[in-house]
Image (cartoon, rainbow, N blue to C red):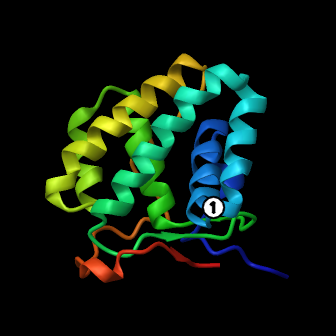
Amino acid sequence: MIQEDPTKAWMSELSDGQQLVVWSFRRWLSGKQSWSLVWNEFAVRFGAEPARPLLSSFVRLVDAIRSGARRVVHYHQPCCPCVGADEALLTSIIGAAQAGRKDLVRTYALEMVQDPMADALVERALDLATVLSERGVEVPHQREWKSFSGVQPSLQEEQREAVTLH
């Protein structure tokens, strides 16, 4: 008998909006070869023209995370059923933005990026949250995550590349 780990969150437990954010994040960070998959998913779901601002907002958000990361950003392989701490944190950022909780967006942003980049991440999260809402995609704000690990120490500039967990 296989026992589930009660400390892990699973993709199947996420809302459709949360799944879309995590799915897109994983594929975008996995490399240029997967970027077209994200575009295709957005275009199929929303239509080509409505998907353009969504993709643009999403890319700006990921770029803010990558350029200001306070530590290595972890993510799982695209097909993995687990939800990692940084993936959960990203959905919390977007969910808090959709809920109008700019204070929480900033708090969460500071767990992912260094202070000088936090305002840019907040702005981009608010923008993405708005674009998602305009397309009928809700990302619920979830305060507690079973797999959420909290703040980790900052890394040197050359150590900020994303890391795949499994």
Asked where in the image residue 55 lies, by quadrant, the reply is top right
Residue 101 lies, in percent from the top left, at 28, 32
Instruction: Return the residue found at the far front.
Output: 32
Q: Secondary structure at mark 1?
A: helix
Q: Position of residue 73 (x, y in %)?
A: 42, 70
Is residue 72 in view from this perspective? yes
Please tell me which residue lies in front, 144 or 162.
162
The residue that appears at 38% across and 30% down in the rendered structure is 127
Query: Of all residues shown, which one is farthest toward the left?
Result: 116
Identify which amino acid the numbered label 1 is placed on: Lys
Label 1: few (<14), some (14–19) or many (≥20) C-alpha neighbours in 10 Å: few
Asked if residue 140 shows in the view, the reply is: no
Residue drawn at (62%, 67%) of the image = 30
Question: Where does the image place residue 62, in percent across and percent down from the top left?
Answer: 44, 52
Residue where numbered disc 1 is placed: 32
Judge left or right: residue 108 versus residue 55: left
